Image (cartoon, helix red, strand yellow):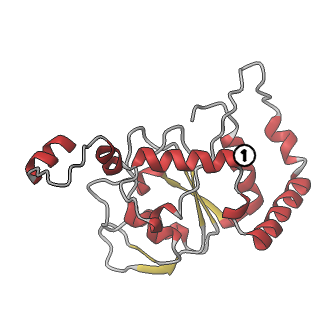
Amino acid sequence: MAGSNGKSTFIQIIQSLMGSYATQINSDVLMMNKNSGGPNASLAKLLGKRLVVANELPENGRLDDTLIKSMTGGDIIVARQVYGKHELEFYSQFSLVIIGNHKPAIYDMSHGMWRRMCLIPFAANFTAAQIDPELPVKLSREMQGILNWALAGVQAWHTEGLKRSLPAAVIAANDEYRQESDLIGEFLEGCRLEPDAYTAASDLYSAFL
């Protein structure tokens, strides 16, 4: 997803609606790296929040699947300073929104992982001439109407559920994202299956790499 498409403006408005119930975290916290699974002080600020936003995902980054599941499944989150002695434990109560121009790599192809994902494409591409520098100010004057719009969305969610009301473009984008993330499935599609054929595991592994 390219820039200049309105996604930052949209999420900033939602954050304004949420007030102190919203917070931001560094996107690096969500990525797989050498510190994954270790103590993370950044998670402590998520206590009591209802909306957590991570901005600007790195290109070719890989999500920490285990952490994402913990943060989005109502599980207990453990936060601790790197050299701290005390741990803070609390249940996740927030929705996690990840904003970026690059889709992160997801290696976990389980249903449990993908039912948590909902890719929302922002397909517009506004030119410099179309960008209104006064738009944030104008939108701030319309917060009451925007709040009513959001509350109508809450009512629809309670009535229909989230997945039932997804637009066709969102469903298509998620299907494509899941397919392109399934590296093993893509590899198997290129294999020829024979009932009596035999291939050494080492050869399969080499071909996959």
Left or right of 201: which side holds 209?
Answer: right
The residue positioned farthest toward the front in the image shown = 196
Left or right of 131: which side holds 174?
Answer: left
Number of numbered labels in the structure image? 1
Q: Which residue is mark 1?
A: 10
Above or below, comparing residue 99 to residue 82 in the picture? above
Residue positioned 8% across, 51% down in the render: 200
Residue positioned 67% across, 44% down in the render: 169
Q: Which one is in front, 108 or 47?
A: 108
Residue positioned 49% across, 46% down in the render: 177
Above or below, comparing residue 130 to residue 108 in the picture? above
Above or below, comparing residue 97 to residue 75 in the picture? above
Q: Is the N terminus in the top left, top right, bottom left or bottom right quadrant?
A: top right
Residue positioned 38% across, 50% down in the render: 182
Q: Is the C terminus in the top left, top right, bottom left or bottom right quadrant?
A: top left
Residue 36, position in %: x, y?
Answer: 31, 61
Residue 156, position in %: x, y?
Answer: 81, 66
Residue 183, position in %: x, y?
Answer: 33, 47
Rendered image quadrant of residue 29: bottom left
Q: Which one is in front, 186 or 178?
A: 186
Residue 209 shows up from this direction: no
Residue 111 shows up from this direction: yes
Residue 11, position in %: x, y?
Answer: 68, 49
**Label 1 neighbourhood size at 10 Å, few (<14), some (14-19), many (20+)?**
few
Q: Which one is in front, 73 or 137?
A: 73
Element on which disc 1 rests: helix
Left or right of 196: which side holds 172?
Answer: right
Give the residue type at disc 1: Phe
